[in-house]
């Protein structure tokens, strides 16, 4: 238990320092930001496929029911890092940006018969952008304006989870089956700071500054189930389902507007935002299945639905009574995502190194959750290729280095198109902490 406590302490302190992932996307200026890809290192090789996976030597936190299948003698510790390059295109203009992130840290172990436990930290949304637009005022070619947009922040979560194999047995043919349940309880926290500065070269015009802030301290609950059944000696199927509770998360969002007269240098400040105003996260549903052939091929499909369409979000408006920063409906849309992925490993515990490598691939499509000026925001296409490379040395041959490359395209008519190439690196340590040795 001392070792577990030490790892937990290192996990939380290290992850708190590095877990805030970054983004350069201008789409992160809307809503709670760009939704994070919450998959682990091995999932990302299959583009996030997870709901039907029951890996005994990987931490699959996207379905907590999978914890029930964690090896009984080992302690799993998984950490992930990513580097990405994004090309932004709008009209005939292009721009490149680079980002690197410490993505997540997770761990899992067996607490008892049929009972697995996991904990970790990972991002939920990311906010990070800085850009400007310029132009002339009306038909003038001398008076111009500049709009500067900046933002940073995001939400992160620390979770504790457990998975338990509730039922198990054998069919009439003597083939095993089982049913597992699980839950993740997370502490969700973070903030955002967004700024828009509207300035003019004409001294007769007034400059305008808008400053949006929020600070979240709340919880998040995710539930999962998995049913697996061996169909015959060569085939097995696992069906998984998840449910995420949607609820208000606080935040007390505020909007501060400062108007400055360029001639008198006198500023007028207005603040709007009710203390009772709260941000929200959506109710989420997921359903997936994985088919396993001879313990070599694993192929599956996931479908997730995030009910953003029913989520309200504050928007600033000018009324006869002045500035109002109030909750509005219709700023989001329900998000549907489908992922298909596969993994092939010739011989997981074979003697030849290359036969133990896990080869992975996956593709996804997601509808937009944002509405921008009444129009649908960016839809998302993505694909990935990856490898699970065994780490073999004199004292450990169970740890895995997960490497994958992802291509992600976000586009929407009349808006910016983003093409991102992301390199993901995840390292899963698999240690025999609980093995009992016998000496003769």
Image (spheres, grey):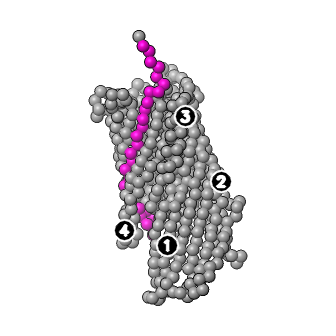
Magenta stretch: give its range. Answer: 411-439
Q: Residue 94 carries which label?
A: 4
Is 421 included in the stretch rendered in magenta? yes
Q: Residue 148 carries which label?
A: 1
Q: Which residue is drawn at 49% across and 72% down?
A: 148
Q: In the picture, which quadrant includes the C terminus?
A: top left
Residue 307 visible from this viewpoint: no
- For label 3, count other residues whose C-alpha is less than 10 Å away and answer few (under 14), some (14-19) or many (20+): few
Instruction: Give the CA distance from mark 2 to mark 3.
Output: 32 Å
Query: Viewed as shown, does residue 334 lie left or right of 384?
Result: right
What x and y, as percent, mark residue 138? 49, 86
Label 1, secondary structure: give it. Answer: strand
Q: Of callouts 1 and 4, which one flags the residue occurring earlier in the amino acid sequence?
A: 4
Q: Name the residue under label 3.
A: 5
Q: Answer yes or no: do the residues labelled 2 and 4 have beta carbons within 8 Å?
A: no
Q: Answer yes or no: do the residues labelled 2 and 3 have beta carbons within 8 Å?
A: no
Q: Which residue is drawn at 51% across and 23% down?
A: 171
Is 229 included in the stretch rendered in magenta? no
What x and y, as percent, mark residue 386? 35, 44
Q: Residue at x 56, y 63 (%)?
A: 193
Q: Of callouts 2 and 4, which one flags the residue occurring earlier in the amino acid sequence?
A: 4
Instruction: Give the CA distance from mark 2 to mark 4.
Output: 38 Å
Viewer-nearest of discs 3 and 4: 3
Viewer-nearest of discs 2 and 3: 3
Q: Answer yes or no: do the residues labelled 3 and 4 have beta carbons within 8 Å?
A: no
Instruction: Give the CA distance from mark 3 to mark 1.
Output: 47 Å
Q: In this view, does 256 lie above or below 265?
A: above
What x and y, as percent, mark residue 184? 58, 40
Q: Answer yes or no: do the residues labelled 1 and 4 have beta carbons within 8 Å?
A: no
- For label 1, count other residues whose C-alpha is less than 10 Å away and answer few (under 14), some (14-19) or many (20+): some
Q: Name the residue under label 2.
A: 248
């Amino acid at each position: 238990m001392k070792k577990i406590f030490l790892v937990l302490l290192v996990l939380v302190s290290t992850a708190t320092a590095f877990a805030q992932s970054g983004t350069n996307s201008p789409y992160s200026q809307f809503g709670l930001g760009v939704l994070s890809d919450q998959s682990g290192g091995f999932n990302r090789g299959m583009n996030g496929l997870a709901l039907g996976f029951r890996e005994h030597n990987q931490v699959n936190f996207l379905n907590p029911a999978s914890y029930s299948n964690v090896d009984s003698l080992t302690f799993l510790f998984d950490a992930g890092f990513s580097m990405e390059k994004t090309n932004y295109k709008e009209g005939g203009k292009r721009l490149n940006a680079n980002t690197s992130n410490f993505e997540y840290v997770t761990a899992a172990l067996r607490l008892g018969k049929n009972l697995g436990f996991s904990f970790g930290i990972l991002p939920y949304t990311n906010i990070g952008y800085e850009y400007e637009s310029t132009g002339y005022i009306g038909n003038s070619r001398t008076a111009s304006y500049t709009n500067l947009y900046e933002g940073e922040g995001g939400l992160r979560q620390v979770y504790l989870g457990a998975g338990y194999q509730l039922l198990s047995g054998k069919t009439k043919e003597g083939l095993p089956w089982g049913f597992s349940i699980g839950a993740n309880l997370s502490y969700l926290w973070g903030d955002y700071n967004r700024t828009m500065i509207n300035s003019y070269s004409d001294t007769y015009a007034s400059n305008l500054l808008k400053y949006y802030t929020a600070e979240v301290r709340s919880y998040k609950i995710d539930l999962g189930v998995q049913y697996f059944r061996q169909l015959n000696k060569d085939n097995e199927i696992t069906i998984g389902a998840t449910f995420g509770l949607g609820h208000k998360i606080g935040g007390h969002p505020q909007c501060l507007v400062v108007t400055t007269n360029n001639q008198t240098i006198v500023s007028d400040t207005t603040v709007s935002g009710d203390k009772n105003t709260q941000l929200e996260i959506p109710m989420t549903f997921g359903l997936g299945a994985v088919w396993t052939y001879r313990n070599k091929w694993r192929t599956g499909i996931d479908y997730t639905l995030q009910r953003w369409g029913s989520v309200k979000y504050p928007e600033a408006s000018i009324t006869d009574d002045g500035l109002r920063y109030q909750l509005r409906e219709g700023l989001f849309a329900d998000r549907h995502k489908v992922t298909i992925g596969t993994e092939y490993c010739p011989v997981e515990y074979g003697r030849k190194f290359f036969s133990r490598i896990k080869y992975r691939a996956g593709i996804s499509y997601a509808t937009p959750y944002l509405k921008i000026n009444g129009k649908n925001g960016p839809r998302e296409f993505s694909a990935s290729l990856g490898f699970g490379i065994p780490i073999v040395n004199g004292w450990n041959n169970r740890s895995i280095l997960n490497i994958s490359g992802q291509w992600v395209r976000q586009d929407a008519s009349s808006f910016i198109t983003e093409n991102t190439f992301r390199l993901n690196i995840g390292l899963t340590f698999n240690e025999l902490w609980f093995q009992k040795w016998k000496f003769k």
